[in-house]
Amino acid sequence: MLANLPALVTDLLRLSLWLLLLALVFLPLERLWAAHKQPLLRQGWLTDLGHYFVNGLLPALVLAPLLSLLALALHGLVPTGLHAWVAELPLGARIAAALVVGEIGFYWGHRLMHTVPWLWPFHAVHHSATDMDWLVNTRAHPFDMVFQRLCGYVPLYISGLAHPLAAGGDAVSIAVLLLGVVWGFFVHANVRWRFGPLEQLVATPAFHHWHHANDGPATLNKNYAALLPWVDRIFGSFYLPAQLPQHYGTDTPVPEHLIGQWLQPLGLTKDSAASGIRE
Ligand SMILES: [Zn+2]
Ligand SMILES: [Zn+2]
């Protein structure tokens, strides 16, 4: 335990620096171009800060060993000819292919979180935010975070586009992860920017705000994609009106505080009403 202390301190420092950087970028943008007027310290901000640090530490502790195990298990599933062909592709083509292949895995993982009754309470934590801003990106149950990342990465390992066993990670994994994380903060931001036809190609705050909308049944279970909205078009869940949503959140009861949000989906609190599909 003590031997791991320096690594933990380094990780906490790294996460604090990232937080500072993100706050320096997003706080002024949200002040200048707010989509909805809301206080800086809106409801749940402290809880989200807790999620930020826990979910920031988890990838190294839980996700990396899990991915390595999965990569070993999946290694033999695909003919080596495909892996050899993929390895010959230029880096740019591998990253572009990884963004599409990873998005399709992520899309279905995310859609399952919404439609499988026992998975939804884990994901309802993310949807419990009633005010949207960049920090809402971090509000996620650890199981939800790990499950969705796995769904995004497994197709990359099966296809040979990424290799979790490479020392220090490989360029494709790092590019996909970095873009995914930074874009995650961007699409949650409380900004009113619209991007015209570009919104059909790349996920924007308006696109993901509609994923969090709670403006009636027609607005639920839309826009699952993280980066590429046309994946939602292909699978019939695209929804992007000209205006922004009026209300965010979920009717599923979710505790306000961090510990409650971790325990409730596991059935470990007295109030376990959070079950059932979000329809
Ligand atoms: Zn969702
Ligand atoms: Zn979200």
Image (cartoon, helix red, strand yellow):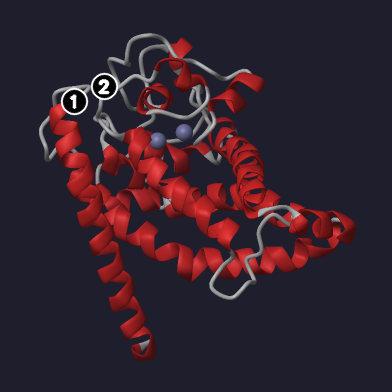
What type is the residue that disc 2 sits on? Answer: Arg
Task: Farthest residue to the bottom: give it.
Answer: 3
The answer to whether the residues at label 1 and label 2 have Cβ atoms under 8 Å apart is yes
**In the displayed structure, would residue 245 be above or below residue 173?**
above
Residue 192, which numbered label? 2
Location of residue 226 in the rendering, given as x and y in whole percent from the top left corner: 50, 36
Q: What residue is shown at x 29% (from left), y 22% (from top)?
A: 193
Residue where numbered disc 1 is placed: 34
Q: Is residue 73 visible?
A: yes
Comparing 163 with 225, the one in front is 163
**Callout 1 crowding tier (Cα within 10 Å): few <14, some 14–19, many ≥20:** some
Look at the picture and state if 9 lies above or below 84: below
Q: Which corner quadrant of the image does residue 142 belong to?
A: bottom left
Q: Could you say where residue 8 lies in the image, as x and y percent from the top left?
A: 33, 77
What crowding class fits label 2: few (fewer than 14 Cα within 10 Å), some (14-19), or many (20 or more)?
some
Residue 269 showing in the rendered view: no
